[in-house]
Image (spheres, grey):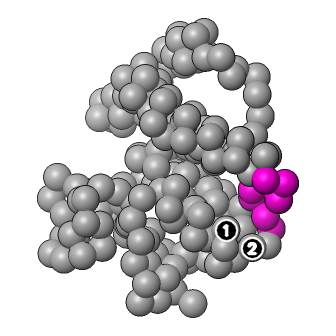
Amino acid sequence: MSLIVFGTSVSPFVRKVRIVLTEKGLLYRHENVNVAKPPDGWRELSPLGKIPAFKDCDRALAGSSVICAYLERRFPMPPLYPSEPYDYARALWFEDYMDDGFAPLGRSKVFLPLIVEPLLAGKPEADVAAQEAAGKRSTRNSPHSGTISSASSATASFLSASASLSPILRSRTSM
């Protein structure tokens, strides 16, 4: 089996896929892709030019939610989505909310100050005051703060540190 995730580790969408792979106990390879300077043939893997892209042997997919849905069907154990239809639909809604609703807000209010700016400044992480301020901004206006869903990989990907710094993901990733 040859599972490959393409994209940069600081992308919350790439991290979402990596979290699902890790939770399912699957070994995979991560290939860093900079969408500003993509490799030759990138549009064949990702027609819209976005990350992540994914390969399972000779099958290619793009888009974090599509990849996660594929992984759930291809590797059903352990299940990461509920089996009851309404709960399944709610999990998809939370995933969509995090991808399309929270992402624009989270990118500027949480992801950039806590992940990107410290990395660009050569720091391993943001200072505590910046983390606390971002945490208050990210949950203050959310109608779903405090709600836990099976779409937590989408949520966790925005709030976790860079996967390249995560010892759990490093230990479960094959090279």
The front one of 83 and 14 is 83
Amino acid found under the numbered disc labelled 2: Pro
Magenta stretch: give its range.
78-85
Q: Is residue 144 above or below residue 174?
A: above
Residue 82 belongs to the span the image colors magenta: yes
The front one of 160 and 146 is 146
Q: Residue beneath label 1, please?
A: 72
Q: Which mark is residue 76?
A: 2
Q: Is there CB contact under 8 Å for labels 1 and 2?
A: yes
Image side of residue 19 versus residue 57, left or right: right
The kind of secondary structure the magenta stretch mainly shows is loop
Q: Position of residue 166 (x, y in %)?
A: 58, 51
Q: Is residue 1 above or below residue 78?
A: below
Secondary-structure class at tag 1: helix
Image side of residue 62 versus residue 28, left or right: left
The front one of 85 and 147 is 85
Which quadrant is home to the N terminus?
bottom right
Amino acid found under the numbered disc labelled 1: Glu
Q: Position of residue 168 (x, y in %)?
A: 66, 57
- Residue depicted at 15% across the width and 59% down the height: 37
